[in-house]
Image: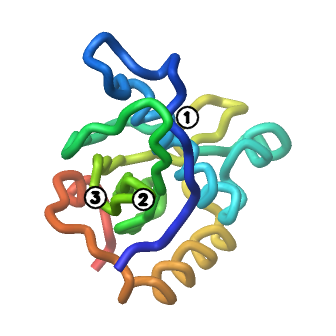
């Protein structure tokens, strides 16, 4: 199962000389999907501007499974989310809206950052609780497959 975040359409200017979407725009669409969750957790654009707190992606692993072309519409879905006090690990999937096939996945490690000092910071307790509640409510829908970055989390046992 997956958790729908948003959709996008491949624009002509996003395609390359191979006739399919250039890899940079896969990341662009994944980032737009991730922003949906960041806003839900008060960690996205609004938070960056008003609270000076947001996330920075520091490592990713992306697979390109089947090409998408100009005009194709895709869905961005959450496959997995976990956290520690300073990091978020998430995995997203891009699927072709009409044909249903998996076009790509990305797994990302993001750090929570205080923009005032441009340093990694601990998530506020309220944000930790909101994320944990979301994970608890949705964990049965997670379908992460293989995770390559999960060991980046520093969970207390």
At 54% from the left and 28% from the top, the residue drawn is 11
Sort mark 2 into few (<14), some (14-19) or many (20+) by Cα contacts within 10 Å: few
What SS does tag 1 mark?
A: strand
Front one among 57 and 63: 63
Whether residue 129 sits left or right of residue 53 in the image: it is left
What SS does tag 3 mark?
A: loop
At 55% from the left and 55% from the top, the residue drawn is 122
Whether residue 14 sits left or right of residue 62 in the image: it is right
Q: Could you tell me residue 104's position as x and y percent?
A: 28, 47
At 29% from the left and 48% from the top, the residue drawn is 103
Q: Is residue 48 above or below residue 134?
A: above
Sort mark 1 into few (<14), some (14-19) or many (20+) by Cα contacts within 10 Å: few
Rendered image: mark on residue 101:
3
Determine which residue is flagged by label 2.
Answer: 98
Q: Name which quarter of the figure residue 60 lies in.
A: top left
Say if mark 2 contacts mark 3, CB within 8 Å.
no
Mark in front: 1 vs 2: 2
Front one among 76 and 99: 99
Q: Could you tell me residue 16's position as x and y percent?
A: 35, 15
């Amino acid at each position: 199962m997956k958790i729908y975040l948003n959709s996008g359409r491949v624009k002509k200017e996003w395609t390359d000389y191979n006739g399919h979407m250039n890899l940079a725009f896969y990341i662009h669409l994944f980032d737009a999907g991730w922003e949906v969750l960041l806003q839900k957790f008060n960690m996205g654009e609004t938070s960056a501007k008003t609270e000076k707190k947001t996330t920075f992606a520091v490592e990713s692993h992306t697979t390109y499974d089947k090409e998408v072309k100009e005009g194709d519409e895709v869905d961005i879905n959450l496959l997995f989310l976990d956290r520690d006090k300073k990091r978020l690990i998430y995995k997203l999937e891009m699927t072709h809206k009409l044909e249903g096939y998996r076009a790509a996945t990305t797994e990302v490690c993001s750090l929570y950052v205080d923009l005032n000092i441009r340093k990694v910071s601990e998530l506020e307790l309220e944000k930790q609780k909101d994320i944990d509640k979301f994970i608890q409510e949705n964990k049965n829908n997670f379908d992460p497959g293989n995770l390559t970055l999960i060991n980046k989390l520093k969970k207390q046992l």
